Image (cartoon, rainbow, N blue to C red):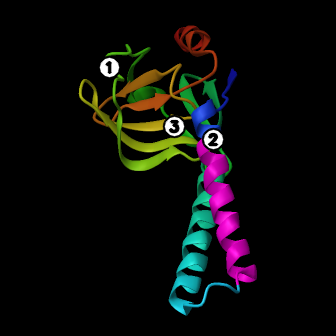
Amino acid sequence: MEFTLSRDKFSIIITSVVIAFALAGVIIFYFGEFIIDQRIHFALLFSSLLLLLLCVVFYFYRPLKYSIENGNIRISRMLGDKIILKDDIKALRIPSKHDMAWPVRTFGNGGLFGYTGRYYTKHIGSMIWFCSRRNNFILIERKNKLPIVISPDEHKAFLIAYEA
């Protein structure tokens, strides 16, 4: 079974703003003859190209859909799917708002085409996110590994399908 995912408004805004800043920096570099100092000129180009590179990387590694195949959970991405084996899964549950309160991004992406990477909350601890939104969470507790958080559009239907 396949489950769709959509981005929340915050992710759409963050993505739009970052892309706009990156493109504006490149445009100003090429047409900005008013910038006299060469160091500022090239710093602007470097930072703009770095932002564009990050946009490309996060675009290709964003989660596209979730699927359940023989008890395994597949997180589909353009560059390499992430498969969570049935034998590694201890439990699936919908975490409470209290569990997911004030997540801190420790090493990851905080809104550019979604929310991916390592996050931390006081009540769960460290976890890995493959989310497109900041709600509809499903916590996948794994044996001897960090838990994984996903965010399908129909999170309750995902749990029912997994248990079936």
Return the x and y of residue 119 as percentages of the image width and height. 36, 39
| Residue nearer the viewer, 160 or 118 | 118
Q: Name the element at disc 2.
A: helix
Quadrant in which residue 99 is drawn: top left
| In the image, residue 58 lies in the stretch drawn in magenta | no
From the top left corner, tell me how far across and down residue 108 is, in percent.
43, 49
Q: CA distance from mark 3 to mark 2?
A: 19 Å
> How many neighbours does mark 2 have within 10 angstroms: few (below 14), some (14-19), or many (20 or more)?
some
- Magenta stretch holds residue 24: yes
**Of the residues shown, which amino acid type is indicated by label 3?**
Phe
- Part of the protein shown in magenta: 13-32
- Between label 3 and label 2, give the one nearer the viewer: 2
Depth check, front residue: 92 or 47: 47
Residue 94 seen anywhere in this rendered image of the structure? yes
Of the two numbered discs 3 and 1 on the same chain, state the one appearing first in sequence: 1
Find disc 2 in the rendering and name its residue. Answer: 13
Between the C-alphas of marks 3 and 1, the distance is 17 Å
* Rendered image: mark on residue 99: 1
Spot occupied by residue 112 in the image (x, y as percentages of width and height): 58, 47
User: Which residue has dot 3 on it?
Assistant: 130
Badge 3 or badge 2: first in the primary sequence = 2
